[in-house]
Image (tube, rainbow, N blue to C red):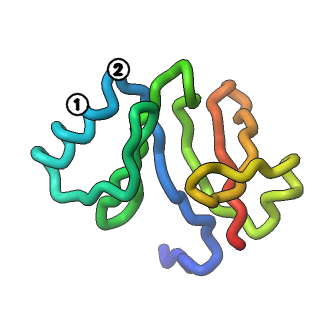
Amino acid sequence: MTIDKNLLDTIDHVAICVVDVKAAVEWYTRTFKCEVCYQDDTWAMLQFNNVKLAFVIAEQHPPHIALFSPDAEAFGKLKTHRDGTRSVYIQDPSGNAVEILATD
């Protein structure tokens, strides 16, 4: 079966909850080949070859998966984040948080 990757949506990142962002960044960058895109006390973003991995503090950000969509506004009102991205959070049928990122 041949898959036309041009017809597929793009996952930007997966965000997982951690207790200590700094400790998570130190462990992942020491253990795996990745680069830090952003880091503060409440979240961090690491770039891997194929996807980004975010670390979040549960009280600050929900664990989630983030996808790009040219129709992000169709999912709800977009919020501009401190890193300049615009997105809206929705839930899948199982209640998982899904972040829809604008492509502009």
- Circle 2 residues within 10 Å: few <14, some 14–19, many ≥20: few
Q: Is residue 1 left or right of residue 95?
A: left
Which amino acid does the dot numbered 1 rest on?
Answer: Ala
Residue at 52% x, 75% y is: 3
Q: Position of residue 64 (x, y in %)?
A: 56, 37
The numbered dot on residue 23 is: 1
Circles 1 and 2, Cβ within 8 Å, touching? The answer is yes
| Image coordinates for residue 11, horizontal then vertical, percent | 53, 58
Q: Is disc 1 placed on a helix, strand or loop? A: helix
Above or below, 84 against 95 in this view is below
Badge 1, how many Cα within 10 Å: few under 14, some, many 20+?
few
Query: Residue 39's spot in the image, x, y percent?
Result: 37, 46
Q: Which residue is mark 2?
A: 19
Residue plotted at (51% across, 21% down): 58
Q: Is residue 40 left or right of residue 28?
A: right
Pick the residue in front: 41 or 5: 41
Left or right of 4? Residue 14 is: left
Residue type, mark 2 in image = Val
Expressed as whole percent of the image width and height from the top left, the position of residue 69 reads 71, 63
Q: As drawn, which residue projects farthest toward the left?
A: 30
**Up-down relation of residue 49 to residue 89 (above or below):** below
